[in-house]
Structures are given as C-alpha cells and as structure tokens.
Amino acid sequence: MRITQGTFSFLPDLTDAEIRAQVDYALAQGWAISVEYTDDPHPRNFYWEMWGNPMFDLRDGAGALMEIQACRKAHSKLYIRVNAFDSTRGFETTRLSFIVNRPADEPGFSLKRQEGPGRNVIYTIESYATVAPEGRRYES
Amino acid sequence: MSSATLTPTPPPAAVQPGPVGQGSAAAGGSAANGPAGGAAAADQVDLGALLAGSHVNEVLEELDRELVGLKPVKARIRDIAALLVVERARQQLGLAGASPSLHMSFTGKPGTGKTTVAMRMAQILHRLGYVRKGHMVAVTRDDLVGQYIGHTAPKTKEILKKAMGGVLFIDEAYYLYRPENERDYGQEAIEILLQVMENQRDDLVVILAGYSDRMDTFFRSNPGLSSRIAHHLDFPDYTPDELGQIAQRMLHEMQYRFSPSAELALREYIPLRMEQPHFANARSIRNALDRARLRQATRLFANADRPVSRDELMTIEGEDLRASRVFT
C-alpha cells in the first residue's frame, strides 16, 4: 500500500528536476529546507530522523538536492521527506512537506480493534513494517 | 540538461511557479526570446538582441565606470562575456558543445579589487544565465577546512550548498594546500571542490583568488585544479594616479571632500606609502582615509567651543593627512 502523506503524495513520485523546482519555490518564499527520514510510516509519527541540520541559508535548490542525494544513498530503503519551514511570525511551522523517497515494498497497515468500557470499540492502525525492530525494517 | 537552461534568462524578476513541474518556466523563457526566436530565424541569431536581452552590457559599463584602472582585467571580462553570449547563440541554433568551464582564478596583490570584480562577475554570469541566483559566497581556508578528522567534508559541503546557484569565491586559496604538513586536511577540501567543480558545472562557479606567486606554486602542486580552471585573470597594481582617483571616489562615497591642501598632501602621500611594507593598494588608501577622518574628528573637537559648519564636517584638510607616519 502506497502511503500518502504530505503534499503531492497522490501524484507519481517527483523527478529530481521537479523536486528542485519545488525547493526553489520554497526558497523563493523564504522558507528553510530540511531533509528527514524514517522507517516508521505511521501517519501519527511526526518525529522523523533529521538528516543534518535544517538549511537556513540556502539560495538554490541544487544545494538541497545534494543533501537529498546523500540521504538517499545512505537510506535508500526508507522514507525520506523534504520539509519547508516558514519562520514568519504567525506561521512558524512547516508550510510544505513531501516525500522524495520510499521503500520499494510498502506493506501497509493492519487495523486493530480493542474492546473498551461498555463494549466501545477502539480502533488503531499499525504498520506491518514496524513489526520488525527498528533498523531492521525494509531489509528485504 | 533541461530545456529551461537553454533559453536566454528572462530578466532577474522571473518568479518560480508554485505547482509541480518546470514546463512553465521554459515557456516563459522562450516568450522572452522575442524577434530572434521567430520562424524566420531558423538558422540565424541576433547577437545584439541576445546581448541587449541579457542586460550584461549595463554591468560591463558599470564595471568600467566604477572601477578605476584594471584595463587588462576589464578586457578579459569583456572577452568572457562575449564568449558566453556566443555560446548562448550556438545553443539556440542547436550547435552542440559542452557547457563552457567558467571556473576562474584571480591573482594579484592585495587590494587590487579581486573581491569587487568577483562580485561583478557573479552578476554578469547571472545575467547571461550561467548561474541561477547570482549571489557570491566569499570564504577562506577556515570556512572550508576542519580541525579534526571528519570535520572537513561536512564543512566544505555546507559552504558548497550555500554557494549553489551562485559564485564561490575562495580568497587566499593557496592556504588550502599546505605541503609542509602531510596530514593537513586542506587536501580533502580540494578534492571535494574538484569533484563539485567537475560534476556540477551548471550549478556553481568557483573563483580562486590570491597573490600571483603563491597561487602559481599552489596550481603547480595541484595540477587537477589548474586544469579545471579556464580563465586566469591577473590583476595589475594601481598606478599612483589611479590610487588618487580611487581615494577621491571613496571620499565621495563617504560624503567627504579634500581641501586643496589635502589633495596636495595625498599626491605626496601615495608614492611614500607605496614604498612602505605591507602596501595593499586600494585597501591602504581606504585605511589612510579612515585615519584621516579620525584626525579630522579630533581636530574638530579641539576647537569645539564654536559650532561647526556642514562644510567643516565634510572637509579633510592637509594637516589630517600630513599627520600620518609615512611623512616622518
């Protein structure tokens, strides 16, 4: 199951030129670019690992692309996303975030039902990938 | 190479579109093509229109107007600009050719305007569409080379990332290579630089600067670097006359002026200063002017019992210059 998180996630994967165009757009807005990766694609997992520091003084998308390539080289089988952070007062948050790398095989999620008080059903989802311990997911 | 880079750059105001894709950027570029891109011009290109469209002439004229002397340097820059325009024209007609190597080395004594010219170079390259952003990142050895093992590569890459789309200006580049220390990390920085200079020519232009003689030894010991630099520009020293003109311009910018006696003093000062050690051309002149301003301020305070006029606040007198130690 192809996970759909962030902007453009219903589109085919972006090419490098498209990624650079997006990064250039973000930089033109004055947003800072950062690269993050994770092996836990749960939608509530906000804390992805940072690939280096956020790049606050970048001028051109080629710089970010260097980092994306380096991250892909190191974590080719994991999810990698690019964030654009807007530091403007009032926003101070991520304005744009999209996935630039994903595992070849995405096993998807299982739905768990738990009986709560008064036979309420509590639903939870769990990625099949996270059944394996951290660092050994997406090994195959 | 994407089609967006083949079209002449529209004026710098071009804004990247938000949505996915770069197709619209290319469309904007060919619209700016104007008359030269018409159907009739299938096998001819109007060089003049290409030049005018790039606004590069304005930068060249500014260079001529604002920088004193430096005749050979200006001539070389014009040559390079002409080459780049021709290269653009060739690309428009589909004549193959690898994108020209634009890395340069600027050699010359201190204070001969290497940094200033490098900044202009970034503008020229930007107008001609050879760098995308046209900013300049000026660094020295300390910004590139780390203190311990594993420190250099991230540091150099950090700088390279910042410089992407613009010009990386490495001042006193010969310090990167220290032959006397075998375990120096400078070599590592050079190797990373070389790799980027070769593989990402479209993203970044590197300008190495430094004293002529030391740069020569530097290039001799790093043949890989030397062979990747297409343009070697040598900055000549300024003549006393040119230094005088530079002083006048600097003062004008600072909104000061010389009294006639000060002008005379300056004319005597320059040759004397040139013979002194550590003479750094325009930079020495700037320092001399800064010290003259200090003395002028002290002088104005010495008779602070009466109000000072606008004229007095603006005028540097002969005595302000003559108090310098070169006259003793």
Image: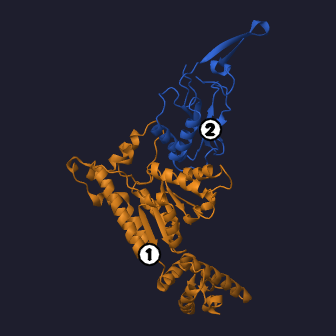
Side of B229 relative to B163 (left or right): left
Question: Is residue A139 placed above or below B216 in the rendered structure?
Answer: above
Toward the viewer: B228 or A83?
A: B228
Looking at the image, the residue that sits furthest to the top is A119
Q: Split into 4 quadrants, where in the image is the N terminus of chain B?
A: top left
Looking at the image, the residue that sits furthest to the right is A117
Toward the viewer: A83 or B111?
A: B111
* Structural crowding at the residue carrying mark 1, measured as other residues with C-alpha within 10 Å and reported as few (<14), some (14–19) or many (≥20): some
Chain where mark 1 sits: B
Residue A120 coordinates in the image, percent (x, y): 74, 9
Looking at the image, the residue that sits furthest to the left is B40
Toward the viewer: B300 or B19?
A: B19
Q: In this structure image, what is the colour of chain B?
A: orange
Side of B51 relative to B269 (left or right): left
| CA–CA distance in space, label 2 to label 1 | 49 Å
Residue A122 coordinates in the image, percent (x, y): 72, 13
Chain where mark 2 sits: A
Can residue B171 be seen in the rendering of this structure? Answer: no
Can residue A41 be seen in the rendering of this structure? Answer: yes
Residue on which disc 1 sits: B70
Quarter of the figure with residue A45: top right
Residue on which disc 2 sits: A94
Q: Amino acid at mark 1?
A: Leu
Q: In this structure image, what is the colour of chain A?
A: blue
